[in-house]
Amino acid sequence: MNYCRRTTKTVTIGGIPLGSLHPLRIQTMANVSTNEVEQAVAQTLRVAAVGCDYMRFTAQGVREATALGEIHRALRQADCSLPLVADIHFNPQAAYEALKHVEKVRINPGNFADRKGDRAQYTSDEEWYQAGAKRVRELFGAFVEEAKALGRTLRLGINHGSLSERMLHRWGNTPEGMVESCWEYLSVAQAHRFEAIVISMKSSNVQVMTQAVRLLVARLDAEGWNYPLHLGVTEAGEGEDGRIKSAVGIGSLLLDGIGDTLRVSLSEAPEAELPVAQRLAQYVGQRALTPKLSYAGHYTYVPFMLPRAESASVADSYGGDSVPKVLVFGAGEGGEKTLMQGDALFSYGTAWENISVEGAEQVQFRCLDAEQFTSADVVTLKEQPNAVLVLNASGANAVGAWRRAVALLAEEQCRVPLLLHRSFAEETWEEVQLIASADLGLLLLEGVASGIVLSSPHCRVAELYSLGLGILQATRLRFSHTEFISCPGCGRTLFDLEGTIARVKKATAHLPNLKIGIMGCIVNGPGEMADADYGYVGGSPGKIDLYKGQECQVRGIPEAEAVEALIELIRSHGDWLEPTE
């Protein structure tokens, strides 16, 4: 219920140490070609000037890895000591070259040593699995020794969308499979007594990402291994959705003391990512300084892997099997049209006693302060069959106050529908957006609540409603608009990413039951959009490949024709709806 940062060892990257004894480190990734040394240096100098701790570059081949040496030298000549990180997929030779030039190398266990399509060579699945494990021990073991000799740091960057065929066959495309993939490589590092390791577990699906991280932490703690963690939601997108998904995924873990460095992956310039990450880190720092809450009960609150809480159904709108609802109190008149019965918009200052939600007039809203909530309140609630509990919290330890109240409800086996009410004194929209996403996202991911309430005198009703819907969508509890899975762009990107995202969104944003991936290249784009229904992927310069699920349907479409071709692909599979406005 109270903040406690997970203890992790110190790993030094260049001159900047990482771990629980140090501040949360902020990083980003270049979106210019690694071979364009002048552009790469200029972008690195810009992010260094606004507080970036580490800068990552793609190195898809030996040529790009070699260019990192030129970038590194030019930066040092410019008196910039920012540590550089190489991002490697599929190419161990590029990884070896990168070790010569940069302070840290990220490798993907899903595609570093395993070979695709080699199952037929073996007489059994077990023989295949063990042969792959042996190859990992040999290839990664040699790589670890080279990193050790050069004094480099490595990141094991496990991605949900790019697990090896062996891992997928044995564990499925699951959080458990991600942990096993990490563990195989981590065990090799342990055998070679190599400690300069950072770990990341990423997915565009926030539920998968947070569950994978928490499963890994539980296993690391059981083993007594305290490696530092890098947090990120991959392919989070841009604009409001990208910020909400990142804050729900990264922020919910940081609030529980998990994580040592973070990257907010937006489909925008690297400079736009840094303020979002910095504000999240700042908020977590505020939680660490709040007074501790006391709890005298006997119920043990388990902070992850909770089933969705069972609650009574009231007015067919709250609790039971109803999807979570959004109520907001903000600047403006309120009363605008909502998407679903049980949602409601009110002017800020409207008293709960005066509230009547259309279609749920018999509901008795009981708004109570989470910090002051007592067992006596639980007794009263159990005597009111039409009650819906609204637990209000504000300040940096809203999460702790809610958890304390939820523990009291669980101890008394009270099944009243619960709305989490986050009220804000903060005046900036970005603060409200990020803090609401982190706080509410954490409890929603844990299976708590039948809905959320947002209130702010400074934010418009429509803004708050959109934010509430975005938080529920990020937690996969309710879909109200098209889900876009878009990469942040890097040196591999083959088209104007931001402009393309805008065009695809304009054409398809009215399809709430679909997830559409927009990926800059084919190196790991198809894998990273594993959760998407349709995909728009850069195949070659000026050419686009279109996907249905993981299967490429059309290759090499001219970029100018690709959005219309995507619409036709969606239409041909019966998923297209004509816009209503």
Image: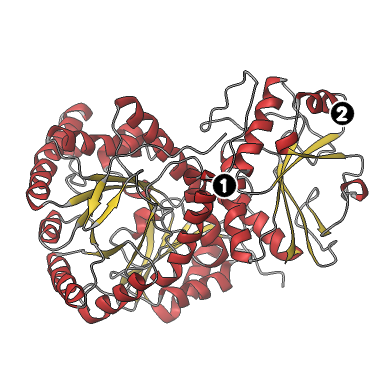
Q: Quadrant of the C terminus?
A: bottom right
Q: Quadrant of residue 215?
A: top left
Position of 453 relative to 315 (above/below): below
**SS at circle 1:** loop
Position of 454 relative to 565 (above/below): above
Asked whether, in this view, residue 408 is left or right of residue 550, the answer is: right
The amino acid type of the residue labelled 1 equals Thr
x, y (%) of residue 458?
73, 65
Of 119 and 420, which appears nearest the observer?
420
Q: CA distance from mark 2 to mark 1?
A: 29 Å
Along the polypeptide, which appears first: circle 2 or circle 1?
2
Mark yes or no: residue 526 visible.
yes
Callout 2–callout 1 Cβ contact below 8 Å: no
Of 219 and 151, which appears nearest the observer?
151
The amino acid type of the residue labelled 2 equals Pro
Q: Quadrant of residue 299?
A: top right
Position of 115 relative to 86 (above/below): above
Mark 1 = which residue?
475
Of 33 and 432, which appears nearest the observer?
432
x, y (%) of residue 362?
92, 40
x, y (%) of residue 448?
64, 36
Mark yes or no: residue 111 visible.
no
Q: Residues within 10 Å of mark 1 (few under 14, many from 20)?
A: many
Asked whether, in this view, residue 101 is left or right of residue 378, the answer is: left
x, y (%) of residue 191?
14, 32
How many badges with numbers are in the image? 2
Residue 385: mark: 2
